[in-house]
Amino acid sequence: MPDRLTALDASFLYMDQPTTPMHVGSVAVFRKPRSGFDYERLVDLISGRIGLVPRYRQKIRQIPYGVARPVWVDDTDFDVTYHVRRSALPGPGTDRALNELVARLMSRPLDHTRPLWEMYLVDGLSGGRVAIVSKTHQAMVDGIASIDISQVVLDDSPDGRDEADDDWVARPEPAPWRLVLDAVGEAVARPGNAVEAAHAAVRDAADTVTKVAGVAGGLLSAVRTAVRPAPTSPLNVPISTQRRFAHTRTELEDYRAVRRAHGGTINDVVLTVIAGAMRNWLLSRGASVTPTTTMRAMVPMSVRGEAETTGSIHGAGLLGNRITSYLVDLPVGEPNPVLRMHHVAHAMREHKQSGQSVGANALVRVGGFAPPTLHALGARAASGLSRRLFNVVVSNVPGPQHALYAGGARMLEMYPVVPLAKGQSLAVGLTSYDGGVFYGFNADRDSMADVDEFGDLVTEALAELLATVPR
């Protein structure tokens, strides 16, 4: 019997709309090895590793008459060269040109008649670099088999690793009558679970709060947050079908220096930097900013291990993380960067001590989202909850602090692309890797024409904090 989509995953299938395509992306920049790195090498690499992610050779089949949720079936016509594509930048191959290409690629929806992923090799970058841009639909992130294909192509050394034997043969697609029969049998065997409406997972804030209020114990802080609307913000407007993308690289040691000087956690420094950038962005737009002005962020974080309990961007691996999430009011009205950081650190401590992180997780679960990775969590939480709950998603994934390679090419940078939710014109993703902290800013093309400037403001906000560190 084919695997049936969970109600959570099916919800993302139905939330896929022209203005809110439900795919998560990444942009990895590599230095070409002396032996070169071209499209054929990437295709060979994917072909040798795709057996580690079986879902990437499966597509979705709808059930006739809509009597049950869709199922995953093998794509009998699977063609890796359809999913792995190539592109090139015009000279001189600037980062800005790469960002424009990424924005256009992320604006396009995935083909629902095929496995829901794409990967692009982008040649022509200056300095002998190439980029790999990936897109994966959130319906494929099922909470168990959460490894993204862009991860399985990476190795700890340029020599790579031995490829496992792959004797995959596509199973024939079931006939329509068999899909209906299986659905009916499932409904008889499990009447309480079968034939759930996928749309039920897509709820507004009022429905979410109602459900949370009925959950026993430990969620009162989350309910209080949910019923208190997020501040009015120019970030929360109707969005278009087109995107802009920008990125910023910073150094992990700078965050550590601020933490050593002022206490708190690395993640407190990150949120303070975002708050400072938000403050200056609002001022640049002529928005009213008073000492009490705040902007609410949905912040999913890793809490893996005692050594890095900040849930931040130290050196934990990309997999196996426990996840918590917070609704945090960023003090963008505070002009002093040190006081701004104290406010953030205090708010985070209050969340942890009051158990509000549990409440925020409950909001995510009640909305129907159980993500296996931090960026997927941020995307799912943002997509399923009303824009009245928060203004922006800040998704923070820890990465390894050593070099990774794909086909012998060393990865220099890795920028996440977090999808926009309805009414959200900006999503911030950041990943630490090999001593750097890499920000990706996915934005609506119409309402965030200044997203490049926002990236510059992040760099300036970090510099402002560094200036307070005693030498």
Image (cartoon, rainbow, N blue to C red):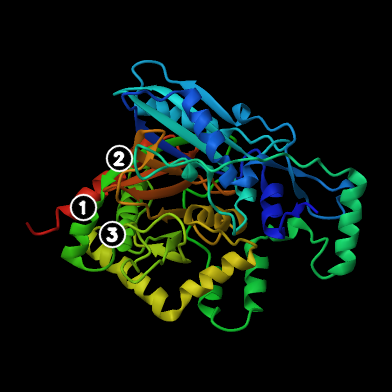
Earlier along the polypeptide chain: callout 3 or callout 1?
A: 1
Say which residue label 3 marks: 269
**Percent position of residue 72, x then y:** 73, 48
Earlier along the polypeptide chain: callout 2 or callout 1?
A: 1
Report whether residue 336 is seen.
no
Q: What kind of residue is marked 1?
A: Asp
Q: Quadrant of residue 227?
A: bottom right
Tell me: residue 149, above or below residue 124: below
Q: Residues within 10 Å of mark 1 (few under 14, many from 20)?
A: many
Say which residue label 1 marks: 254
Label 2, label 1: how far apart the Cα atoms are: 16 Å
Depth order, front residue of 398/241? 398
Depth order, front residue of 327/313? 313
Residue under the image location 29 percent in, 61 percent down: 266
Say which residue label 2 marks: 456
Q: Is residue 171 left or right of residue 52?
A: right
Frontmost of labels 3 and 1 is 1
Q: What kind of residue is marked 3?
A: Val
Quadrant of the frame with the C terminus: bottom left
Q: Is residue 195 left or right of residue 211?
A: right
CB under 8 Å between discs 3 and 1 = no
Label 3, label 2: how far apart the Cα atoms are: 17 Å
